[in-house]
Image (spheres, grey):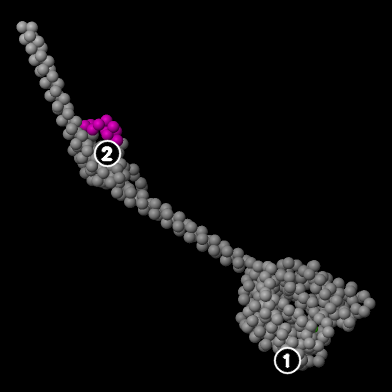
Amino acid sequence: MAQAPAPNIYFGSRTDVGCQRERNEDSLIVSPPLFVVADGMGGHKAGDVASEVAVNTLSALAPTIPDVDLLGRAVESANHAVITEAQKAGREGMGTTMTACVIQGEKIAIAHVGDSRAYLLHSGKLQQLTRDHSWVADMVEQGHLTPEEARVHPSRSAITRALGSDPYMQPDLYEVTASEGDRLLLCSDGLTGMVDDGSIQAMLARVRDPQRCAAALVNEAIANGGADNITVIVVDITGTNAKAERRERRRSRMWMIVLMLALAGIIAGAAFAAYNWMQSSAYLIEENGKVVVYQGIPDSIPGIETHWLVRETDVNVDDLQPSAQTHIREGLVVDSLDDAEHLVSEYERQVKEDAAEKMARGKTVVSSSAASSSSSKSETAAKK
Ligand code: CA
């Protein structure tokens, strides 16, 4: 199973003694963002001590960001630690290679000494990122050997730079910007001596899970003879934190737009409802002493037609009940034109009734005075 203790870093690793060695002198670090392969050498137990001292020192001193200078200095410190250890009895001449990477998103810092390698699989193509510090690599560069001849050359293990001997040793430093979907491979020469680049490329491209891929590469080296210790680290480059943050920002921006659209929709809906209500409303108001009917609302809104005259009625505002007069003079808003017309009819009825009542009252007054006079007459008559 691939481990994933840090976000955006998926990796697998495997180390194996191989088929012909008694001890595994390779050491490795798989501790994101740090990945290291060290291939120790030296008699007796010295090889594994050298690689172990080197990785322990690096583990303590390596930067947590892909700063190639800081990583280089950590490798120099590891060199001094191995030199100090090599001064102890029985450990003379021990040394180790070191290929160290710090990965953050798509940025990779590499410090490299010896013939362990870093490769990058980019768009299905394998690129060797590091240059071997070995005699055969020099021969290939000078055109005396082909890469394939170098791979199987009897002197292929002779390295020209290592940790553990020269206090002024400096690692080669590389800053690499990979792409999402790329795959980083770190390995000791127990892999590259047994498996050619074409097969490594095919395996990296075919086996998706990084842990299975690391195991498959080691198994292939063993199947081809396993002459040396084999160590493989496969790291998938799955995109930068910045990229993830950008994605997150894009997502929240999108949500904000959706929210704003929803809000705008609600506001537009409310505005539409308000406009509809305004259009269907009606009101009664006094003009020239008469009650007139308007459609809309009495208030004015700039740029919007809020009301228009429907008709002038024959109802005199002065003839209405005092409370109705006040309402009409202020402008009496109703829900619809129908309601307005109902009200007008009601006013007409009231005015008619009031007039009839007034008239009736006038008659009553007249008839009662007639009655009283007649009664006084009758009284008179009675007195008579
Ligand atoms: Ca080796």
- Closer to us: 274 or 110: 274
Report the residue at 73% width, 87% height from top.
221
Q: Earlier in the sequence, mark 1 or mark 2?
A: 1
Residue 187 visible in this rendered orientation of the protein:
yes
Tell me: residue 220, above or below residue 285: below
Q: Is residue 181 left or right of residue 27?
A: left
Q: Main secondary structure of the magenta part?
A: helix
Q: What span is colored magenta in the figure?
A: 318-329
The amino acid type of the residue labelled 2 equals Ile
Q: Which residue, as the protein is rendered here, is positioned at the far front?
A: 382
Which secondary structure lies at badge 2?
Answer: strand
Between marks 1 and 2, how big is the CA–CA gap? 104 Å
Q: Residues within 10 Å of mark 2 (few under 14, many from 20)?
A: many
Which secondary structure lies at badge 1?
Answer: helix
| Residue linked to disc 1 | 148
Magenta residue check for 321: yes
| Residue linked to disc 2 | 285
Q: Is residue 140 left or right of residue 177?
A: right
Q: Quadrant of residue 122?
A: bottom right
Residue 132 visible in this rendered orientation of the protein:
no
